[in-house]
Image (cartoon, helix red, strand yellow):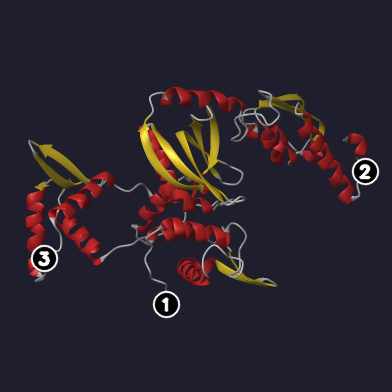
Amino acid sequence: MAYNERVKNFNRIRDYMREFYVYGFKSRDEFTKKSARSYDDEKRRLESWLGDYMQFRQTADGKNVFLSIDSRLSRHNPLYKAWKTKSFTDGDITLHFIIFDILYDPEKKFSIAEIMKAIDTYLSEFQVPRMFDESTVRKKLKEYVNEGLIVSEKTGRTVYYRKSKMEKNPEACMLDFYSEVAPCGVIGSFLLDKLTNDPKCFAFKHHYITSAMDSEIICRLFRAIREKRGLTIETINRKKNTVSNHDVVPLKIFISVQNGRQYLMAYAPEDKRISSYRTDNIISVKYGETVGEFNELREKLNHMQQFMWGVRTQSRSGNRLEHVEFTIQYDEGETHIPQRLEREKRCGKVEHFDKHTSRFYADVYDSSEMIPWIRTFICRITEIHFSNEAIDRQFKKDVQVMYEMYGVGGSENV
């Protein structure tokens, strides 16, 4: 039988999903943040959503639980199921359906007095006494207005409510793509649930599903950016197990094409600089006041992007910018190599010397962010130079260690 207890605090679910499946596949004995009973309760809850994707491995330290998802077979993000379990009371459900039954026609509008009278009529037919006072109904209507489900209009001193005119759903394949690649893609997943046929238009070689757990945080960040508001964000340092508060001005959301990780780029008035914050480390978001210099800060970030390879906005070496350049050679049948350079160069530049030789160069805030990408060309690199001497030494040392590991000569080329 499925585990049917409703979720009241999604942050708790978000935390357990990470601990179980993202940060190390902890066994029952290794999970020390909560009691063993809490572990069992949350594990059963997650199993009810993700049972088809869960596997177990027995180790000397106990049984570890992990997710196993084949993107060739699973076209939709299974973690969205966590968002489709909500907490409702009987009163919540009753009031929801009564309100939308009253406001079924978008062309008709009702005052709060008319809505209260209609609610009493509905309940009397079932011989149920009044369950909701006017204050409760007003709060529920305000909630639906904020969500865009209901529209409020003021005529004189009276506020009238009517149902929003719902737009036609986008095409199924568009929703399918949006739900799997966009931030807050869970919105597309909810819309897909309304369709009678499952489109499955797309399959993904690299399917980054864990961002689903950050959907609520991302949604609140987008709202703050749209309204140009400051924020107080609460973040956790998982290595030190500490929690901190930061007053920031949110500017943009960056998403890594290499690992799917999402970052908030924000200006911190205390430090007087733009920094990045991983969204999976953000616990909560509190809205602040509108920021007058938002447009100027956003423009500053746009200018900085011409020197950003990833999310770093200052040099580790203390210099303003770090220079990187390397030369590669490739054979006649390897035209995909220079094409890759052009396609993936980001803020860098590429020069093609002849049909077999190209040079890449860039000035960036932090050249260490480029190392994983540069390594993918390592067997074709004939010359490389970093202005950051520490990075230069480390890169060449790593290459030498690799040569020694595979028993290959090459120290004269390093």
User: Quadrant of the rendered structure where residue 132 is?
Assistant: bottom left
Give the residue displayed 61% in from the left and 64% down from the top. Answer: 26
Looking at the image, can residue 228 be seen? yes
- Residue topped by disc 2: 409
The crowding category of the residue bearing disc 1, from other C-alpha atoms within 10 Å (few below 14, some 14 to 19, many at least 20), is: few
Task: For marks 3 and 1, give the CA distance.
Answer: 33 Å
Q: Amino acid at mark 3?
A: Leu
Residue 197 got which mark?
Answer: none
Q: Earlier in the sequence, mark 3 or mark 1?
A: 1
Determine whether, in the image, residue 292 is placed left or right of residue 234.
Answer: left
Task: For marks 1 and 2, give the CA distance.
Answer: 61 Å
Residue 1 got which mark?
Answer: 1
- Residue topped by disc 3: 123
Q: Amino acid at mark 2?
A: Gly
For residue 256, above or below residue 289: below
Q: Earlier in the sequence, mark 1 or mark 2?
A: 1
Q: List x then y, in percent, for residue 84.
A: 38, 60
Q: Quadrant of the C terminus?
A: top right
Q: List x then y, in percent, for residue 375.
A: 75, 40
Determine whether, in the image, residue 188 is placed left or right of residue 203.
Answer: left
Q: Nearer the viewer, residue 82 or 165?
A: 82
For residue 273, above or below residue 15: above
Q: Amino acid at mark 1?
A: Met
For residue 353, above or below residue 143: above
